[in-house]
């Protein structure tokens, strides 16, 4: 049975608090905190980007998988903040981990679900017997327009997964994708910041697709919410995952281990994938885990994983996600944050 | 700063820390070279450098070269890796007051610099506190 | 091998010479040397220049300068060893005379650094370091020497004040040198409060960007006796290389190439460090002078800072170092420095150094260094 054989995370050390952002724009911090259920978010250092975080997360996944990187047959990075418009991020990752030259690489994009897209493709290639191992990374250094609501949550992080058939840590029991054309959030070429449809991004977008994918995969697999130990939803803010969980019949404690957004922010293509790494870190053999991503535009990918005995052997081979989230934090004030995020217009 | 071909040529070193170990006397050449400076032997095998070590010396660059003007001030140091090879690189994610000779650091893959808004992005190794 | 003498010296005032091109700067100094020697035709021309290509877009200096000096079709060569280009030019000239290939040789050094921006100058100077494994990471020249300084301070207890004392001493000497770029004194406080460039080195720990040239006329000793000036012999020439990357050195507080070059020079001259009366050393940064004193064997390893503090190397001390003001006060037009060091020693040994004159100077030594110690050239001079 194919599944995850290694997983890893990379979270930048810098943080900025909601209060700090609100102060600059004259907004009411407590209501942002309460409304978004977010306290702080991660901020990449100027020398970190989607590629560098993907490399670090993939190295952790390799430590857990214990394989020869030359045997990786496919490398995918899913992101909406690829450093180049034309020149793949995946090739840098493939070189850095030593998977080149015999490897298939592609950069994927689908708003926040580009990470799970890569996972879907890599897993499917392994399932089809076309490759021995596949690496998929969800990573982003997302941008929020200054003063916009998204500025409070747009964060940075990466999660990497290696799929294979032997020494599986979590078997992939089922996959399901639910897609429609829904213009809830977009960015045109040459625009620096994205735009969104305000409240339109809720019910017809996030909730419709997540519930569509969750119901679809549960019907396909014959499983009910109570059968799962844990569930991870895409986390654009702190409230949506609990609301959609309630709508579907999941309990808070199933969601909490993978719920990172209050301290991390929304890492876009890294969001549900990082939630899954945090969940795997505390899971036990036999646990059933459901993950449902969401990408604006719009679509959701759902996966059902069953944790094996091997989780006990690999869990400690690389840093745990909550450790990366809680330790070595460096708080920034807005000026440094704006400089780091290239929001300050400089002379040529 | 390097041209695309000069940067690309050093990728095995910049991305994967590939070095050459002298088959005769064990000297590790980074970057790899043709002749061992210790024993003049010409036979090498490819190895990967250790990924952690301790700071031998450090400084904080406050008057940077042009490509690094946005980054200053930044710390650069020489690190004794655990396999005995010495490497020069930036030390990041560390408050300047916490830099000291002997401090343990490890290697992370980072952006070293990019040529403005339109040029190539150069990646390589940097050091972070262990 | 014939004995070699210096019969002419020439140097113009150094500084930001806006009105003068590289050709003009060089030719002026060369003419002063030829006039000082009383010679109007030479058998060979050796020019030291680090980077005319990057600074003024000009290579092929050998022929260009031979032509501007009115010496065409004289054989000529331009040599480069980063900041040791001048010392290397002297060595090549010495070898030509000693070997009998040429009788009268003009050795010159020149650098024109102010026609480019500060950034471009920094880039050009950075080519003395390892492009791919030092400069690629954002290291600068001050940064390299700062790494050496911090390690030296940690290992030997050298203090920030001791580094500043080098600058104070050299500026004090430079204030007596009419040709120096910065002929004024500075105090320790001024040095310690000047802007930080690369911790722990401040702007006043660093030698400046300078336009300038210097030249010497060499000939065999038998010929020299016919000329007007007191005979000053070059009794030794020593050169050594080392890996250019600082991280390749075993001990980053020690300049091995200077030690090796000096060893060869002392052996050739049959002399020991105690026999040297005065030294022109390569103080590109204050820490450099301290490390060089140790590598030359003037003091034990690690004791350089204390020696400066004790006044061993002041103008009135036992072994004056950088009576000219050194690179710090005199200026550092890269390719010219090694030649200017020799100009100062020759003037001192002739008794022509005016207020800077070191009493009873009989044996002098010049030490010129490239990069962070990738090359060193040491010459020893003796008055007849």
Image (tube, coloured by chain):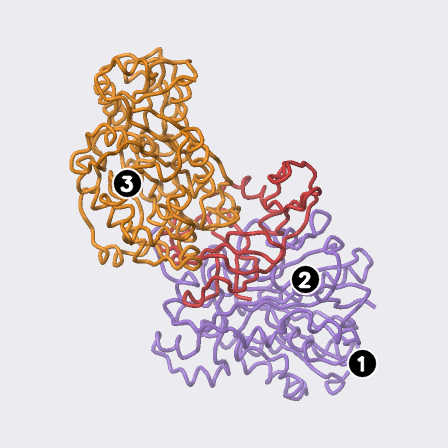
User: In front here: C3 or B105?
Assistant: C3
Please state the horizontal and vertical placement of residue C300, each as a whole percent of the image. 41, 49
* C-alpha separation, residue under disc 2 versus residue under disc 3: 63 Å
Q: Residue beneath label 2, please?
A: A136
Front label number (1 vs 3): 3
Disc 3 crowd rating (10 Å Cα; few below 14, some 14-19, many 20+) is many
Task: Please indicate, yes or no, whether residue A182 appears anywhere in the rendered image.
Answer: no
* C-alpha separation, residue under disc 1 versus residue under disc 2: 27 Å
Please state the horizontal and vertical placement of residue A303, each as a whole percent of the image. 72, 72
Q: Quadrant of the C terminus of chain C?
A: top left
Q: Residue beneath label 3, please?
A: C322
* C-alpha separation, residue under disc 1 versus residue under disc 3: 88 Å
Q: Residue beneath label 1, please?
A: A222
Q: Colour of chain A?
A: purple
Question: Please, what secondary structure does the residue beneath circle 3 have?
Answer: loop
Task: Please indicate, yes or no, whether residue A94 appears anywhere in the rendered image.
Answer: yes
Q: Is residue A306 left or right of residue B92?
A: right
Q: Going 68% across and 62% down the picture, which residue do you hit?
A: A136
Disc 2 crowd rating (10 Å Cα; few below 14, some 14-19, many 20+) is many
Please state the horizontal and vertical placement of residue C23, each as a whole percent of the image. 28, 24
Front label number (2 vs 3): 3
Q: Which chain is orange?
A: C
Q: Is residue A264 left or right of residue B32?
A: left
Q: Going 24% across and 26% down the picture, which residue do you hit?
A: C10
Question: Please, what secondary structure does the residue beneath circle 2 have?
Answer: strand
Q: Chain of mark 3?
A: C
Residue A96 position (above or below residue C378): below
Q: Which chain is red?
A: B
């Amino acid at each position: 049975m194919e599944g995850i054989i290694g997983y890893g995370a990379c979270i930048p050390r810098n943080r900025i608090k909601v209060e700090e952002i609100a102060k600059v724009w004259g907004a009411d911090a407590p209501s942002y905190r309460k409304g978004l259920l977010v306290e702080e978010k991660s901020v990449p250092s100027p020398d970190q980007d989607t590629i560098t975080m993907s490399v670090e997360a993939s190295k952790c996944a390799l430590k857990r998988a214990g394989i020869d990187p030359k045997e990786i047959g496919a490398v995918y990075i899913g992101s909406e903040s690829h450093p180049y418009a034309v020149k793949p991020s995946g090739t840098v990752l493939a070189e850095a981990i030593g998977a080149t030259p015999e490897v298939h690489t592609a950069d994927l994009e689908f708003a926040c679900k580009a990470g799970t897209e890569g996972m879907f493709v890599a897993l499917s290639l392994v399932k089809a017997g076309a490759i021995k191992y596949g690496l998929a990374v969800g990573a982003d250094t997302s941008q929020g327009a200054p003063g916009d609501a998204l500025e409070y949550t747009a964060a940075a992080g990466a999660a990497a997964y290696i799929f294979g058939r032997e020494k599986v840590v979590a078997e992939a029991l089922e996959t399901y994708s639910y897609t429609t054309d829904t213009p809830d959030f977009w960015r045109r070429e040459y625009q620096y910041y994205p735009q969104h449809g305000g409240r339109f991004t809720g019910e017809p977008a996030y909730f419709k697709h997540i519930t569509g994918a969750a119901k679809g995969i549960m019907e396909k697999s014959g499983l009910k919410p109570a059968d799962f130990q844990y569930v991870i939803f895409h986390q654009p803010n702190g409230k949506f995952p609990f609301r959609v969980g309630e709508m579907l019949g999941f309990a808070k404690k199933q969601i909490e281990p993978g719920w990172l957004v209050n301290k991390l922010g929304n890492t876009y293509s890294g969001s549900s994938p990082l939630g899954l790494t945090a969940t795997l870190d505390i899971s036990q053999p036999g646990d059933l885990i459901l993950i449902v991503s969401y990408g604006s535009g719009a679509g959701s990918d759902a996966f059902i994983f069953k944790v094996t005995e091997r989780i006990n052997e690999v869990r400690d081979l690389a840093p745990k996600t909550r450790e990366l989230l809680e330790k070595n934090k460096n708080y920034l004030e807005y000026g440094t944050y704006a400089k780091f995020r290239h929001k300050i217009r400089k002379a040529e | 700063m390097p041209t695309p071909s000069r940067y690309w040529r050093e990728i095995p070193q910049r991305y994967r820390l590939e070095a050459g170990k002298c088959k005769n006397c064990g000297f590790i050449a980074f970057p790899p070279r043709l002749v061992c400076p210790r024993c003049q032997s010409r036979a090498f095998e490819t190895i990967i450098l250790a990924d952690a070590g301790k700071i031998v010396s450090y400084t904080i660059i406050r008057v940077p070269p042009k490509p690094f003007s946005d980054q200053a001030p930044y710390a650069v140091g020489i690190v004794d890796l655990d396999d005995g090879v010495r490497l020069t690189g930036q030390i990041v994610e560390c408050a300047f007051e916490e830099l000291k000779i002997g401090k343990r650091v490890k290697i992370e893959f980072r952006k070293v610099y990019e040529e403005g808004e339109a040029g190539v992005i150069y990646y390589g190794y940097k050091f972070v506190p262990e | 091998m014939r004995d070699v003498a210096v019969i002419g010296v020439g140097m113009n005032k150094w500084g930001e010479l806006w009105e003068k091109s590289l050709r003009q700067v060089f030719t002026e100094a060369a003419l002063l040397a030829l006039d000082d020697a009383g010679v109007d035709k030479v058998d060979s021309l050796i020019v030291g220049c680090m980077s005319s290509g990057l600074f003024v877009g000009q290579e092929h200096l050998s022929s260009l300068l031979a032509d501007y000096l009115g010496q065409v079709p004289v054989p000529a060569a331009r040599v480069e060893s980063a900041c040791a280009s001048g010392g290397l030019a002297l060595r090549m000239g010495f070898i030509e005379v000693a070997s009998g290939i040429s009788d009268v040789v003009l050795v010159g050094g020149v650098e024109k650094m102010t026609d480019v921006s500060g950034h471009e100058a920094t880039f050009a100077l950075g080519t003395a370091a390892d492009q791919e494994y030092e400069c690629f990471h954002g290291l600068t020249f001050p940064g390299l020497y700062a790494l050496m300084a911090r390690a030296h301070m940690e290992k030997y207890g050298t203090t920030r004040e001791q580094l500043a004392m080098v600058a104070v001493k050299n500026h004090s000497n430079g204030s007596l040198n009419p040709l120096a770029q910065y002929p004024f004194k500075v105090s320790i406080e001024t040095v310690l409060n000047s802007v930080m460039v690369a911790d722990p080195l401040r702007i006043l720990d660093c030698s400046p960007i300078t336009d300038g040239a210097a030249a010497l006329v060499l000939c065999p000793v038998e010929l020299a006796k016919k000329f007007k000036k007191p005979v000053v012999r070059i009794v030794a020439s020593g050169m050594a290389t080392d890996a250019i990357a600082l991280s390749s050195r075993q001990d980053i507080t020690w300049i091995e190439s200077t030690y090796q070059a000096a060893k060869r020079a002392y052996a050739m001259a049959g002399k020991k460090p105690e026999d040297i009366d005065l030294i022109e050393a390569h103080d590109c940064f204050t820490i450099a002078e301290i490390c060089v004193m140790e590598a030359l064997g003037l003091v034990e390893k690690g004791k350089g800072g204390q020696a400066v503090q004790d006044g061993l190397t002041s103008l009135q001390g036992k072994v004056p170092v950088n009576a000219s003001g050194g690179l710090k006060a005199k200026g550092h037009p890269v390719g010219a420095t090694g030649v200017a060091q020799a100009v100062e020693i020759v003037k001192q040994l002739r008794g022509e150094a005016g207020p800077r004159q070191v009493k009873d100077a009989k044996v002098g030594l010049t030490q010129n260094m490239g990069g962070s110690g990738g090359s060193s050239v040491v010459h020893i001079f003796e008055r007849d």
